[in-house]
Image (spheres, rainbow, N blue to C red):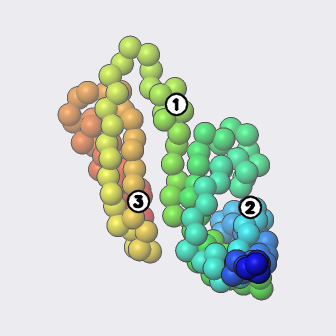
């Protein structure tokens, strides 16, 4: 009789640790959450989406999401940087008056700190002069 051999799969299981994620200084460096990883360094570069209400504690800002990117590990905690700030489309829809046409502008702007700023702003006025003035004012405010 042929002998039966048990073959064990060569699967290596690596133990994961929970790495706390810290918000940027503008949000008082509060703990946003935790993520599992094989090592703390493995989380660098990961993007997470956090509701602005979670960061500020203000319930009126729950229609805004922020994207944070983990940039470095400090004392076993993941430090983040704000990469994106976006308003949910239903909230924009509520800003525009009824029975008005909505005009949107979308701009990709390189800021001084190397951040690309994507902006979508609704307007309900169709006059070209108002439209051009608002666009230039918004660009100047963002670039400051």
* Vertical relation: 105 (above or below) 76: above
* Residue mark closest to the camera, 3 vs 2: 2
Mark 1 vs mark 3, CA separation in Å: 21 Å
**Residue picked out by circle 2:** 32
Label 2 residue SS? strand
Q: Secondary structure at mark 1?
A: helix
Q: Residue furthest top?
A: 99
Q: Would you say 109 lies left or right of 113 here?
A: left
- Which quadrant would residue 12 be assigned to in this image? bottom right
> Which residue is disc 3 drawn over?
117
Establish if 92 lies above or below 143: above
Can residue 2 be seen here? The reply is yes
Residues at circles 2 and 1 in contact by the CB criterion of under 8 Å? no
User: Quadrant location of the C terminus?
Assistant: bottom left
Residue 90, numbered circle: 1
**Few, some or many C-alpha atoms within 10 Å of disc 3 (few <14, some 14-19, many ≥20)?**
some
Q: Residue at x 47, y 28 (%)?
A: 93
Instruction: Give the vertical position of 94 relative to 77 (above or below).
Output: above
Task: Please give the name of the residue rendered at 36% of the width and 32% of the height, measured from the top-left corner.
Answer: 123
Horizontal arrangement in the rendering, residue 118 relative to residue 61 (left or right): left
> Mark 1 against mark 3, which lies toward the viewer?
1
Q: How many marks?
A: 3
Mark earlier in primary sequence (3, 2) = 2
User: In the rendering, at what x and y percent does residue 34 appear?
Assistant: 76, 65
Badge 2: how crowded within 10 Å, few (<14), some, or many (20+)?
some
Displayed quadrant of residue 103? top left
Taking depth in this image into account, of 144 and 100 the one nearest to the observer is 100
* Residue 13: x %, y % from top left: 74, 77
Q: Secondary structure at mark 3?
A: strand
Residue drawn at point x = 61 percent, y = 73 percent: 70
Q: Counting other residues with Cα less than 10 Å from the Cα at mark 1, is it few (<14), some (14-19), or many (20 or more)? A: few
């Amino acid at each position: 009789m042929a002998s039966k051999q048990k073959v064990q799969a060569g699967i290596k299981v690596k133990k994961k640790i929970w790495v706390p994620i810290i918000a940027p200084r503008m949000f008082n460096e509060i703990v946003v959450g935790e993520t599992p990883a094989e090592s703390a360094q493995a989380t660098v570069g990961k993007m997470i989406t956090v509701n602005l209400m979670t960061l500020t504690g203000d319930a009126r800002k729950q229609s805004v999401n922020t994207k944070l990117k983990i940039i470095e590990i400090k004392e076993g905690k993941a430090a983040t940087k704000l990469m994106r700030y976006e308003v949910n489309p239903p909230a924009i829809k509520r800003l525009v008056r009824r029975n008005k046409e909505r005009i949107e502008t979308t701009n990709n702007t390189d800021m001084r700190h190397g951040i690309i700023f994507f902006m979508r702003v609704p307007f309900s006025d169709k006059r070209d002069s108002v439209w051009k003035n608002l666009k230039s004012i918004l660009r100047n405010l963002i670039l400051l």
